[in-house]
Amino acid sequence: MIRKFSAAAVLCIVLAWRPLGAQTGGAASVSHSAVPARTGIYDVGLDVKVEALLGKMTLEEKVGQLVQYSAGQPTGPGTGRTDYNDMIAKGQIGALFNISTAKETNAYQRLAVEKSRLHIPIVFGLDVIHGFRTEFPIPLGLASTWDPPLVEKAARVAASEASATGIRWTFSPMVDIARDARWGRMAEGAGEDPFLGSAMASAYVHGYQGSRLDAADSVAACAKHFVGYGAAEGGRDYNSTEISEHTLRQVYLPPFHAAVNAGSATIMSAFNSINGVPASANPFTLTQVLRKEWGFRGVVDSDWTSILETIAHGTANDGATAARKSFLAGVDMDMVSSLYHDHLAALVRSGQVPQANIDEAARRVLRLKFALGLFERPYADEAHEAEAMLRPESISLARTAAERSLVLLKNEPAPDTPILPLAGGVQDIALIGPLADDPPSMLGSWAGLGRAEDVVSFHAALAKHVGEQHLFQVKGVGITGGTDEDLAAAVESARKAAVVILALGEHAGEMTGEATSRAHLGLPGRQQELLEKVVATGKPVVLILFSGRPLTLPWAFDHVPAVLAAWFPGIQAGPALVRTLYGESNPSGKLVVSWPRSVGQEPLYYNALSTGRPADKADLSKPPSTGADKYVSRYIDEQNSPQFPFGYGLSYTTFRYGGTELNTKQLKASTLQAEPDGVSQSRTVLTASAEVTNTGSRAGEEVVQIYVRLQGTSVAQPVRSLKGFQRVSLAPGETRKVTFALAPDAFALWNDGNQFAVEPVKVTVWIGPDSAHGAAAALEILP
Ligand code: BGC
C-alpha cells in the first residue's frame, strides 16, 4: 500500500477547499477561476443572512462580536474581568473559551440566545491541540508519522468529542515552522519543513472542519500563530523575530497558506514582532498577504492579550492606540485584552476607525457563526455528551498514531543482534526512570480534557505483557531531583534483569509547550547520571526518550545500543510502546526536526543555505589543523551536521534505495508557470522514481522522500528542500518502484522581486530515506 504526498497529491486536498472570491494583487497574484463550490465560511449563501442581521445591530453590538474572554482556567495573564454573564446579556461578548462541559457552555449560551437583544449565539473555543478527551501524540509526534490521512482522522475524533460539549472552535493547528529546539513550542507543531508543515496543516483543517462546517460534529480550525512565531531569537518564547520577506514567504507563510486553502475558518495572530512590527498589529502580514493576496474571508483572532502587549513591544503607548493599530492592521477579534471592548466604539465615534471596518469584522464573526450552524443549533446535547468521548475506534486510532509517531534513532547489536525488538520469551526486565509510570506526562502539553486515568502507562502495559514477576520497576530519580539512594536502587534492579529499559526525558507540562524555552537541552536533573550508572552495569539498555523536542545526548548516542524517540504518545502510550518494543509494530516514524549534537548548533535545520565557504570537504570531526579545514563555515569544537538528520528514522527491517531516475533531463522555464496557492500543483512536469527494496526479514513501512536543490537562482536556495513523500509498505524481499509526480511548484522559488516563479537553473533531485541520503540525479531548467 502506498500513501503519496507530492506536490501533485497535496493538490487534490487543496483544491477541495480553496477560498472563493480571492482578490488578486500584491507580490503574488492569484487566480481562482477553477475553484469548486464548497461549504464553510466561503459559502456565498451565508451572506444574505449575515447582512440581514448586521443591518439590525448597533455599533456596540457589532463591537461585542469582536470581544473574546477566557471564562475558565486561565492560560495566560488575566484582565481581572469576571462579569461575563452581564456582558453576554448585553451583547458585549462574541466568543468565550476555556469552558469544558456541555452544561457550562449551554448555561452561557442560554444567556446569549435568550437574554441578549439580537439572540446571537456565542462561539465557544478551546485549545484542542492533539485531542480532546482521546489524547493523541503531541503534534510533533503526529507529524513524525508523516501520515496526513491519519492526522486528519485524529483531528476528526477531536472535533467530534469537543463539539459534543458545545466547543465548536479549536485554536489549532499550530503551523509555526520551528527551527530551534530551545523553543518549547516546537512540541506543538509539525517541525522545521514548510512542505511537510503544509501537508499537516491541510490535514488538521480537513479533520476539524470535516466536509461540512455546519455538521454538529465539526469545529472551526484556527491556524496559528500568524506569523513567524517560531523564529523567536535565541529560541526564547515570545521573543522578537527578524525575518526577510523572502524567508517569510518561502519558509514561514506556506503552512498558513495551505491552511487557508484548506478552508481554515480562522487564523490567530502571534505574540512576536516581525522586523519591529508586532504580528498582532501588522498590516503587511494581516492585510496585504492574508486578505489581499490569499483572499482569506475568515476571522483573525488575536493571541492571548497580544493586542495589549503591543504596548510592551513599544508600538503603542496606551490601550486606545493598541486597539486601533491592531484593528486597522486586520485583527478582528480581541482575545482577553478587553481593549476592543473598552475603546473600539469610541474610536469609531472620534473618526479614528472607520465604521466600515467594524462592519466588516463583525460580518466575519457572524459568517463564522452562521457557517457553524450555531443559529439553528446553539446548544450542546448534554444527554449525549459522554457518548462522544473515548469511543473504542478513537482509542484504537490513538494507538496507531502513537505507534507511527515513534522514531527509532539507534538499534545496534548488543552483543551480536540488534537489541530491538526484544526477544519474545520470558526474561526479566528492569524498567527504570521517572517517565515509566507518569500518565499525566504521556498526555503532553495542551492536553485538552485528557485525563491521566485514561492513559495506559508504559509500566502498566509492560507489566501486563511480561507479568509483574518479571518486571522490576524503580523510578531511579525524578525528572528533576533524586538522591544517591535512588540511583543505587536503580543500579541494583538493573543488575538483576536481563534487559534494562530506561524511560527518561522532559516533564510534558513544565518543560515543553508554551513558555518552556530551554537553554540546555540535555536530560534534566540527575537523569544523565542515572543513565551512565545503569549503562555501566553492562546490561543491554534500551533508552526511551519522552520529550517535546530533540535532546542533546551525545553520550547516550555513543553508549546506549537502542534509543527510541517517543515524544509524548498520548493515552495509548503504554500499548504502543510495548507492541513496538516486542516487534508487533515495526517503527516507521521519521524525524521532522534536525536532531542537534549540541545546543550551540541551534537554530539547526536541514533546508539551510550553502555559504560561500561550505565545509563539506573539511574534516569536522576534530579541530582544524590545516587552512583548508579552518577557513570554512564551521565550529572549531563541534560538527556542522546534526546527530540525526531531518527525515531520519530506523525500522526493524532495512531498505535499499536504487538510483534516482527522471523522465527527462531538461525542462523549459517558460512552460513552468507556478502559483503559490497550489493552483499549478495539478500539472505534472517531471516524474522521478527510485526502486526501494525491503532487504530485511520482516515487513515494514518506509517513508520515501524526494528533495531538490536549485542552483543558479536569483536568490540562493536551500541545499535541499523536501518536495514529496510517500509511505510505502514492503514485504520482506519486496522491491517497489516509487514514483513522484512533481509540479512546477517543486522548482519555483520566491525570487529577487518577491515573485513565486521558476528560473532557468540547475536542479539536483534526490530520492532517499532522509534529508542526508539518496542518489542524486541532475536536471536542467532552460530559459
Ligand atoms: C497561546 C495560544 C493559545 C491561547 C489560548 C496563548 O497563550 O499562545 O496558542 O491558543 O493562549 O489559550
Image (tube, rainbow, N blue to C red):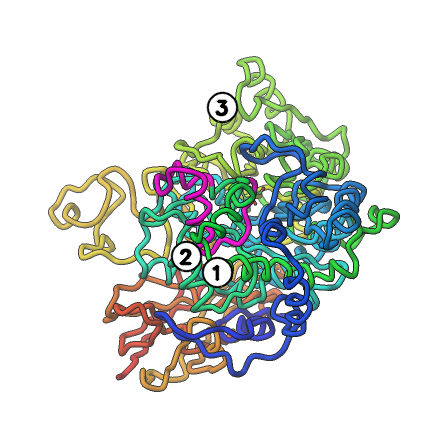
Q: Nearer the viewer, residue 146 or 583?
A: 146
Residue at disc 3, secondary structure? loop
**Disc number for residue 81:** none
Q: Residues within 10 Å of mark 2 (few under 14, many from 20)?
A: many
Residue at disc 2, secondary structure? helix
On the image, the x and y values in percent for residue 232 come to 38, 43
Identity of the residue drawn at 56% across and 32% down? 78
- Is 99 left or right of 477, judged from the image as shown? right
Which three-letter amino acid code belongs to the residue tagged 3?
A: Gly
Which three-letter amino acid code belongs to the residue tagged 1?
A: Pro
Of discs 2 and 3, which sits in the foreground?
Answer: 2
Q: Quadrant of residue 214?
A: bottom right
Which three-letter amino acid code belongs to the residue tagged 2?
A: Tyr
- Is 249 left or right of 347, judged from the image as shown? left
Q: Nearer the viewer, residue 333 or 610?
A: 333
Residue that numbered label 3 is attached to? 525
Residue 200 shows in the view: no
Label 1 near label 2: C-beta < 8 Å?
yes
Residue that numbered label 2 is attached to? 252
* For marks 1 and 3 on the same chain, the one whose residue lies earlier in the sequence: 1
Residue 739 shows in the view: yes
- Judged from this view, the residue extending furthest toward the front is 350
Q: Residues within 10 Å of mark 1 (few under 14, many from 20)?
A: many
In this rendering, is residue 764 above or below 139? below
On the image, the x and y values in percent for residue 300 come to 53, 55
Identity of the residue drawn at 64% across and 41% down? 447
Residue that numbered label 1 is attached to? 255
Magenta segment boundaries in residue numbering: 308-336
